[in-house]
Amino acid sequence: MKSKLSVLLSLTALILLPGLLWADCTDLTNYTHWVLQDSHTILFYRGNRALAVITLEACEAQPNSLVRLITSYVCESDKIMIDNTECSIMTLQIMN
């Protein structure tokens, strides 16, 4: 009975929450700087190495914007702060 219930719950989660199950996440604790690709796309770097590319959903960033992480471990659909405004992350691409 317990195994059937766990399978049912797993399938329900898979159907209802696919974005959470397969969302890209990365730790940006030690990023040193960021660069704008365009007003909605921010590249995070550690030294010369690109760590991640974040695309903002509805916010825009400027070259002189204040960009702050709310949490150091960032996933798609999380939020970051741009000029003291919470902004949703639409996509997160991890660079290798």
Image (tube, helix red, strand yellow):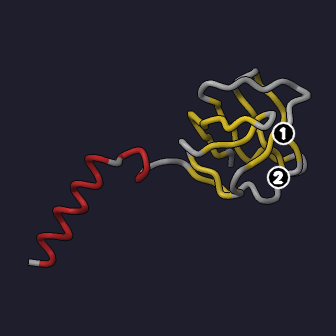
Look at the numbered discs 1 and 2 and tell me whether their residues touch, using CB distance below 8 Å. yes
User: Residue 45's spot in the image, x, y percent?
Assistant: 82, 45
* Quadrant of the image containing the N terminus: bottom left
- Crowding at label 2, few (<14), some or many (≥20) Cα neighbours within 10 Å? some
Q: Residue 40: where, in percent of width, then height?
A: 70, 24
The residue depicted at 74 percent of the width and 54 percent of the height is: 28
Residue found 75% across the figure and 33% down from its top:
42
Amino acid type indicated by mark 1:
Trp
50 vs 25, nearest the viewer: 25
Q: Quadrant of residue 44?
A: top right
Indicate the amino acid at tag 2.
Tyr
| Farthest-out residue, bottom | 2
Mark 2: which secondary structure? loop
Decide if residue 2 is on the left or right side of residue 81. left
CA distance separating discs 1 and 2 = 8 Å
Label ID, residue 52: none
Q: Quadrant of residue 63?
A: top right
In percent of the image, x 18 and y 66: which residue is there? 7
- Label for residue 34? 1
User: Which dot marks residue 31?
Assistant: 2
User: In this figure, what is the number of numbered marks?
Assistant: 2
The percent position of residue 53, horizontal first and vertical second, equals 69, 38
| Label 1: few (<14), some (14–19) or many (≥20) C-alpha neighbours in 10 Å | some
